[in-house]
Image (cartoon, rainbow, N blue to C red):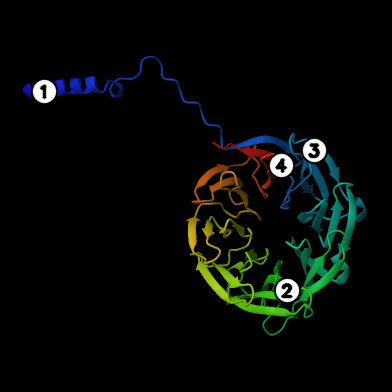
Amino acid sequence: MKYLTFLVASLLLLFACNPEASFPASGPIEPEEPKPPLLEVAWATRMNHEGPVVNLNNGVLYDEWFIYSDGAKLMAFNKDTGDKDWEYEPKELQLPKIQKSALSGNVYLARAGDYVIAIDLDSRTLKWADNIREMDMRLRELTLAANGKLYVTADYRFATSDHQPHLFEFDPETGARRTVYVAPRPDSIGQKSISPPAIWQDEQGDEYAIFNYRPNAQEPPGDVMQYLMAVNLRTQEELWSTKVNDGFASNGLHPPVLYKDELAITGGDWSMYGFDLRTGEQRWRYAFDHPWAIWKNTNHLIHNNRLYVNNGQHDVACLNPKTGAVCWHNREGGANCTDNMVYYEPENWLVFTSWGYGSVMVLDAVNGGVLHRERAYAGSAYNNDVVYDPERDMFFTSTYEHAIGFRVNRE
C-alpha cells in the first residue's frame, strides 16, 4: 500500500513538472493536410478512339508540342492543354509504321520499315526519304550522334553467304548518305552484327565511330562473342578492336556511352565495362550477379560523373564511370526500363518508364531509393520514354491509349 501511494505521488509530481507531455491539448486535433501525390497528371488525351496505339516508338518535344506517332502518322499534342493541334502523314510513300525516331532541330528523323525519312516539322512536309530496301538492305537501328549526324545500321542480304552489316551516315538536312563501315562477310566463325555507334573526336579533329561488334551473332547466346571497335570516319580504318567477352554478347541495340575524353563504356554478358578511348585497353569491369546477357532495352546514362544503368530485369544501379565502383544498386528499381532515363536536376531524381512494371518510376539518383511508382493511367500501362521540358518543368510520355503530360510535386 505504501509502495502504491509512493508511485501515485511520483507520477503526479512528473505531470506537474511537464504537463504538456502528459495531457492532450484542449479542443479537437486538426488533421494534417494530405500531401499531394509526387506525380500529378496535368492532362491525358486519348490518342485514337478506335483502339490502343501499339507502338514502342518514343515521343519527341518540338516547339509547343509533344509529338508521337500512330502508324506512319505524327500527332502533335499541345504541351499546355493536351489538345491534338495537328496531324501529319507522308501519304505519298504509303509508309509502314514508324518504329524509331530522333529530332535534329526542326527535322524529325525516323525509321519506317526499310525507309529512313526526314519530316520538316515547321512546314509539315516530307523533306527526304531513302529506301534502304532498294540496295537489298534490311534496316536495323538508328541513332542521332553528338556530331549532329544520323547513323543507321543495315544488313546487306541478311542470312545469306553475302550477308554484310553496314554502317551509314546521313546528313539530317539533305539526306546525303555515305558508307562509313562494312563488316566482313560470314566466315567459319559465323555471321556478323554491329550496334549503333557513339562518336568520339580526337585531338587532331578526327572522328571515330565506337560500336559493339559480334563476329558470330547467330550462335547460341552463351557462345556469341562481343568486341568493341573504333573506326576512323574519314579514312574508314580501324583504330582498335578489343574483346569484351567470349559469350553472352549484349548491348547491341544502343551505342556505347563515352565518359569525358577518356572511356567508352558498354554492357556485355552480366557486366559493365570501361575501355580506354585511345587504345581500347580495358580499364575496369563490374560484374552483376545475373548470369546471362541482359543489357538490351535501356541505354546507359552518364550525368554528373555518375553512370546509371538498367539491366533489363528489375535492377537499376549507379556506378563510378571512371573506376566502375558501385555507388548503389536497387534490385527493384524498374523492370525493363525503356530507352532513356531522364535526370531531373532540381531534385536529383531519375524519372523514367519501366515497361516491365507498366509504370513511371521516380528514383533518388543519390541513393537509389524508389520515391514513386505511378501505375497505369485509366487501366492503360505506361510504355514509352519520358521526355522533359525544362521551360515548363513538365514531363511527357504515353500509355497504349493516352498521351500524357505530368509534373512532379517538389517539397
**Observer able to see residue 305:** yes
Which mark is first along the chain, 1 or 4? 1
**Residue 343 placement, left or right of 233:** left
Q: Return the mark for residue 204.
A: 2
Tag 4 and tag 2, C-beta contact below 8 Å: no
Name the mark nearer the viewer: 3 or 2: 2
Residue 296 spot, x, y in % from top left: 63, 62
The amino acid marked with disc number 2 is Gln
As helix, strand or loop, the secondary structure at mark 4 comes to loop
Which mark is first along the chain, 3 or 1? 1
Which mark is first along the chain, 2 or 4? 2
Q: Quadrant of the N terminus?
A: top left
As helix, strand or loop, the secondary structure at mark 1 comes to helix
Residue 242 spot, x, y in % from top left: 62, 78
As helix, strand or loop, the secondary structure at mark 3 comes to strand
Name the mark nearer the viewer: 1 or 3: 1
Q: Quadrant of the C terminus?
A: top right
The amino acid marked with disc number 1 is Phe
Which residue is labeled 3 in the image? 84
Along the line of sight, the residue nearer the viewer: 76 or 275: 275
Between the C-alphas of marks 4 and 3, the distance is 14 Å
Pointer 2 local density, CA inside 10 Å: few below 14, some 14–19, many at least 20 = few
